[in-house]
Image: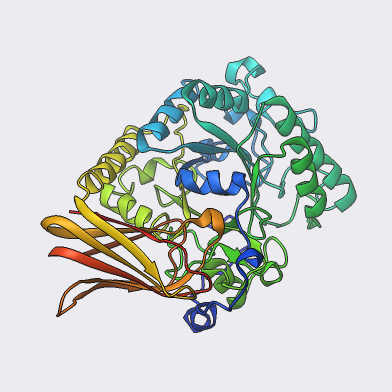
């Protein structure tokens, strides 16, 4: 099993905590948190691609120790446009590149260390992977994002907190000012020892303030936000009950661990005071970096579609990692699986049922009903529910059943949010009833039906 990039967070189940995360307290319509325009656009993209690439690609390791020679890095056929085209073919709207991982090797020529592409034979020391990645994204209409690990197992100042924090701010400043507008800036809380055996105290408030100043529209990801959060595991499975709101004190800092922290990340809170939707990060391979031995272990198209359902289909966003090979290209198998995923999803949503009439009514307080009449009896096997989350997330209990004197329950659940996808046994119906059984304020919920 590959090591988690997080602060050695244990992947824990927290079923005992789910019950206390379900009920919606009665809060006023205006008091519920709502997404910013940036958060709303970010979640509506639904799918992004993560690119783990660096010196680890050439050492066949997941975590480098910082002693790797830059001379190892030489991706002779590197083509960032090939990465972006493959992501685009999968339906992704944005990508995130590991500009620096825990080993400290920088994929851009930085003034902060010699441990970078400038000391490698690639492009005769004149190359810049970050530049090629960002430029490729712009050419192909993809939104670029960057990951920069705060843990640095190479830099001599790591563990001397004040000095290294200055170094890290300088690295971020280079990344945030040289490459144009960034869509997402990605942080994790990994915090092991540096080359001097010391641990670092990160200055997250200073870090977030710098990003806000230099890239005001960028979405910041970490366990503790501030804009979007982790889901508490790297399996690609968001909680079935999944609120975009959270109590910020429940995840007090990046790298916090424990059952309650994992439960909060997995499920959020109905009475959360901040809007902090989740991103579900998972790799197409067992590892995050490329390993030749894993060429036969790439997730199948069916696996990838299922990940879409357990992330996007549970009110999260899917961040799918696809690592380049030592040549600097995505492997043919990975590229084919991405295209296959898109084709399969397109097929699933290609046959919406023809609706004759759809009526929404409420009790004016906490419950609502949508009745859908079809043009003719048809077989339904897929439900797609959506809340108008620009006004906040409000539903905590819902059900869909056939209409008539003997209604048959097709599906039920707790939260909906941006999207709730449910496969159901193929059932021939002429009309359906969606019941929003509990919500703090009832808003029209959309229900789309597919063969």
Vertical placement of 38 versus 10: above or below? above
Vertical placement of 352 versus 248: above or below? above
Q: Based on the displayed image, in which of its 4 quarters is residue 236 positioned?
A: bottom left
Q: Based on the displayed image, in which of its 4 quarters is residue 145 positioned?
A: top right
> Which quarter of the figure is the N terminus placed in?
bottom left
Q: Position of residue 159 (x, y in %)?
A: 82, 53
Q: Residue at x 14, y 63 (%)?
A: 430
Q: Residue at x 43, y 75 (%)?
A: 363
Vertical placement of 383 versus 271: above or below? above
Q: Residue at x 46, y 56 (%)?
A: 418
> Given the current orientation, which residue lies at the most extreme right position?
162
Q: Is residue 66 left or right of residue 416?
A: right
Q: Is residue 426 left or right of residue 436?
A: left
Residue 12 in view, yes or no: yes
Q: Position of residue 249 (x, y in %)?
A: 71, 70
Q: Based on the displayed image, in which of its 4 quarters is residue 379 positioned?
A: bottom left
Residue 155 in view, yes or no: no
Q: Position of residue 286 (x, y in %)?
A: 41, 52
Q: Residue at x 67, y 72 (%)?
A: 250
- In the image, 142 versus 163, the foreground residue is 142
Q: Is residue 40 left or right of residue 327?
A: right
Q: Position of residue 200 (x, y in %)?
A: 80, 55
- In the image, 224 versus 189, the foreground residue is 224
Q: Is residue 216 left or right of residue 89?
A: right
- In the image, 160 versus 354, the foreground residue is 354
């Amino acid at each position: 099993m590959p090591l988690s990039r997080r602060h050695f967070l244990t992947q824990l189940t927290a079923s005992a905590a789910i019950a206390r995360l379900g009920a919606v307290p009665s809060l006023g319509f205006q008091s519920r948190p709502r997404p910013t325009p940036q958060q709303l656009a970010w979640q509506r993209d639904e799918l992004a691609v993560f690119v783990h690439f660096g010196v680890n690609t050439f050492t066949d390791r997941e975590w480098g120790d910082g002693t790797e020679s830059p001379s190892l890095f030489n991706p002779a056929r590197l083509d960032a446009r090939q990465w972006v085209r493959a992501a685009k073919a999968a339906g992704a709207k944005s990508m995130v590149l590991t500009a620096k991982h825990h080993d400290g090797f920088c994929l851009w020529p930085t003034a902060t260390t010699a441990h970078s592409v400038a000391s490698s034979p690639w492009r005769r020391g004149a190359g810049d992977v970050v530049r090629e990645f960002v430029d490729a994204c712009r050419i192909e209409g993809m939104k670029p994002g960057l990951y920069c690990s705060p843990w640095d197992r190479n830099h001599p100042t790591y563990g001397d907190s004040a000095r290294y924090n200055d170094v890290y701010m300088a690295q971020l400043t280079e990344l945030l000012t040289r490459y144009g507008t960034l869509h997402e800036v990605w942080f994790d809380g990994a915090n092991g020892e540096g080359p001097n055996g010391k641990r670092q105290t990160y200055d997250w408030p200073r870090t977030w303030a710098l990003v806000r100043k230099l890239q005001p529209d960028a979405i910041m990801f970490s366990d503790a936000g501030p804009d979007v959060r982790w889901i508490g595991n790297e399996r690609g499975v968001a909680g079935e009950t999944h609120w975009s709101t959270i109590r910020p004190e429940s995840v007090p800092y990046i790298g916090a661990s424990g059952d309650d922290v994992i439960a909060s990340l997995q499920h959020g809170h109905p009475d959360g005071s901040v809007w902090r939707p989740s991103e579900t990060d998972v790799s197409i391979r067992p590892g995050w970096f490329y390993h030749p031995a894993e060429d036969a272990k790439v997730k199948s198209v069916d696996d990838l579609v299922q990940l879409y359902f357990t992330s996007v289909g549970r009110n999260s966003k899917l961040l799918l990692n696809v690592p380049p090979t030592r040549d600097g290209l995505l492997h043919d198998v990975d590229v084919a699986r991405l295209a296959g995923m898109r084709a399969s999803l397109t097929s699933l949503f290609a046959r919406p049922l023809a609706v004759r009439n759809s009526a929404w009514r409420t009790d004016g307080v906490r419950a609502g009903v949508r009745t859908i009449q079809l043009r003719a009896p048809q077989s339904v096997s897929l439900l797609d529910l959506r809340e108008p989350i620009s006004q906040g997330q409000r539903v905590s209990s819902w059900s869909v059943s056939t209409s008539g004197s003997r209604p048959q329950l097709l599906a039920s659940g707790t939260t909906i949010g941006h999207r709730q996808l449910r496969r159901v046994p193929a059932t021939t119906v002429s009309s359906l009833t969606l019941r929003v059984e509990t919500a703090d304020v009832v808003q029209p919920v959309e229900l789309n039906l597919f063969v």
